[in-house]
Amino acid sequence: MLERKEIAYEKTVLIGIITKNQDEEKLEEFLDELEFLTYTAGGEVVKRFTQKMDMPNSKTFIGTGKMEQVQAYVEEHEIGTVVFDDELSPGQLRNIERILKAKIIDRTNLILDIFAQRAQTSYARTQVELAQYQYLLPRLTGLWTHLERQRGGIGMRGPGETEIETDRRIVRDRISLLKKKLQTIDKQMATQRGNRGKLVRVALVGYTNVGKSTLMNVIAKSEVFAENKLFATLDTTVRKVVIGNLPFLLSDTVGFIRKLPTQLIESFKSTLDEVREADLLLHVVDISHPQFEDHIDSVNKILGEIDCTDKATIMVFNKIDAYKHAVIDNDDLTTERTKAHYTLDEWKQTWMSKIGDNALFISAINKENMDEFRKRVYKEIRDIHVTRFPYNNFLYPEIVEE
């Protein structure tokens, strides 16, 4: 099992806005996720600031009065890091730094920073470095005094810390070099994928922290790093797995997230090729998460961006052991029943019923309903295999339900 070094947590505040496209409830969801991202990166959130606006302030993201509140709080409590829930423009970044005199991080930079922490292989580190440079390039002028004053910690891993003396030309040269390096590795990885023979290929996809790596460990009896943090897995892991007597290749890919930086989608193109070239997708969902339907939509959106929406897919609703539904008191006549009050059986009667046997409900960590999972996956892989190799149909009999 991989070891993780202890991180000294930085005092951090979060900032988000309520707009016509993002109501208060949705903002709280995003800030909850942003807090988890901050914790994963090594920060301790001590306060949240929110403001209702028609649209972000073009100069400082939030209004003048709210900025004064944030400034007073940052100075009084010696806050070192301020995290914004949306991507800041270079101009906004410079203006906010000038006012708050603290380290300013936006959601994109935070996600890139976590990826920088999590990258274990040379390939993953190259992908992350490319994404960081692409993010850094338009922001160079506003970062110098900031980087000289505050080094290390959230948002400062990777090129930001080692290339303080650089200019745009050098950064562009570095981006070009990294792209060429990735192209070379991509060709090698494409060759590796081609050399895996004609085995059926299955890819685990899903939102970050839904239990893909835990499920991989159960199915493949492997030791893939898994923990309750976002983006615990960054490098794609491929294992040969046998269910019944049928072998196939199973890959565990990087988790998706809402507002995933475009730089990462581009940089991790080859990693996502594992998804593109898979014969079957296992879309893992954390059904215990209150916003799991939004997570499904986010994953489907990214799958659409990489042209994978038409692939054979089994929905795997994981963490049924952790699922809890809200309960309305019998004497309470004011509370309206919502999806939060659905039991698992009630969920199964909703849109999930239309998926039929392509919806599985399991607990990977407790190995609950794993026999049903294996039978369903075996059937799907067998159908793909038999279609591809009809002459060895007899080698892999259908599993007959008792």
Image (spheres, rainbow, N blue to C red):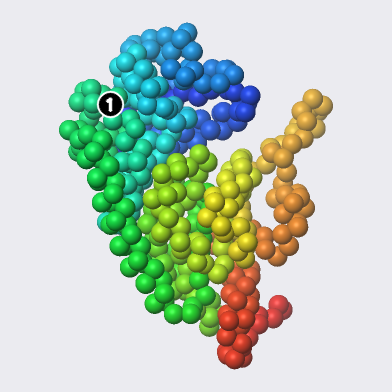
Residue farthest left in this picture: 165
Q: Residue at x 62, y 73 (%)?
A: 380
Q: Quadrant of residue 41?
A: top left
Q: Is residue 79 visible?
A: no
Structural crowding at the residue carrying mark 1, measured as other residues with C-alpha within 10 Å and reported as few (<14), some (14–19) or many (≥20): some
Above/below status of 269 relative to 370: above
Q: Quadrant of residue 382?
A: bottom right
Above/below status of 123 relative to 228: below
Residue 295: x %, y % from top left: 58, 45
Q: Is residue 20 visible?
A: yes
On the rendered structure, is 376 left or right of 210? right
On the rendered structure, is 225 left or right of 245? left
Along the line of sight, which residue is nearer the eye, 50 or 197?
197
Point out the image quarter for the N terminus.
bottom left
Q: Residue at x 75, y 33 (%)?
A: 328
Residue 290: x %, y % from top left: 61, 40
Q: Residue at x 50, y 44 (%)?
A: 257
Above/below status of 82 relative to 138: above
Residue 220: x %, y % from top left: 45, 69
On the rendered structure, is 46 left or right of 327? left
What's under tag 1, amino acid-wise?
Answer: Thr
Kindly identify which residue carries mark 1. 141
Query: How many discs mark residues in the rendered view?
Result: 1
Q: Residue at x 56, y 63 (%)?
A: 281
Along the line of sight, which residue is nearer the eye, 373 or 192?
192
Residue 13: x %, y % from top left: 41, 23
